[in-house]
Image (spheres, rainbow, N blue to C red):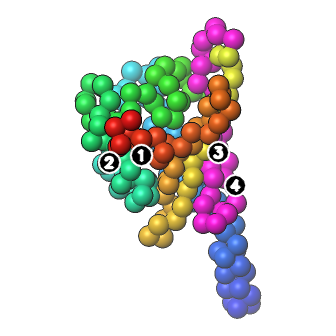
Amino acid sequence: MKTIAVVIASLIAFSGIGHAADFIAPVKEIMEATKSNWADNNSDWTDIFDASRLDRLYSRDFVAKYQAAAQFPAVDDDGISPFDYDVIVNGQDACPLEDLRMAAAPVVDGVAEVTVRFKKSACSDAPDGKDYTTVHFLVVEEGGKPVIDDIVTENIETQARDSLKATMALIAKGQ
């Protein structure tokens, strides 16, 4: 019996079935911070790229691109962020996030795509106020743990996907 249990556990581990929740974990932490940032609770803004999160939640390649881009801070209160907008809601304004949903796709070529959907403008009277925002987190395993390797937003106007790593590379080049 013990051998059968070991074989089943090995098959589950090899197939990736047991890892879906693991790939969602870093995304969940980022989304909880983002949701808190836009809540009506007057709490302090949580930097999703602070040093402790960069070390734990993001891939080495993502961190390198972030640090290169951070050499060119956007105009903000701290003068340390390369962004002058919230990269998750893909804008400078949002309402409290509503109807937030997360789902992880199976791992393909070492990457699990975690798709997050939410309404960022539900409190708005604008025609698109009830539309969903979709963000794709590309999660890889490094050092035995899942980490975010890229954050990809859907550009509603161009119907294109915008990679945050590509944006950071442009910022680092001074563009």
Q: Which residue is mark 4?
A: 105
Residue that numbered label 2 is attached to:
68
Marks 4 and 3, Cα distance to the nearest angstrom?
8 Å
How far is mark 2 from mark 4, CA to CA? 30 Å
Q: Amino acid type of disc 2?
A: Ala
Marker count (numbered):
4
Task: Name the spot of residue 144 as percent of width and height, x first.
Answer: 48, 70
Query: In terms of sequence position, does the residue under pointer 1 or pointer 2 come before the other?
Result: 2
Residue 107 shown in magenta:
yes
State how far apart marks 3 and 2 are (Cα). 27 Å
Residue 169: image tag: 1
What number is the disc on residue 115?
A: 3
Considering only order in the chain, which callout, 3 or 1, is on the residue closer to the N terminus?
Answer: 3
Which quadrant is the N terminus positioned in? Answer: bottom right
Q: Residue at x 53, y 53 (%)?
A: 25
Residue type pointed to by label 3: Thr
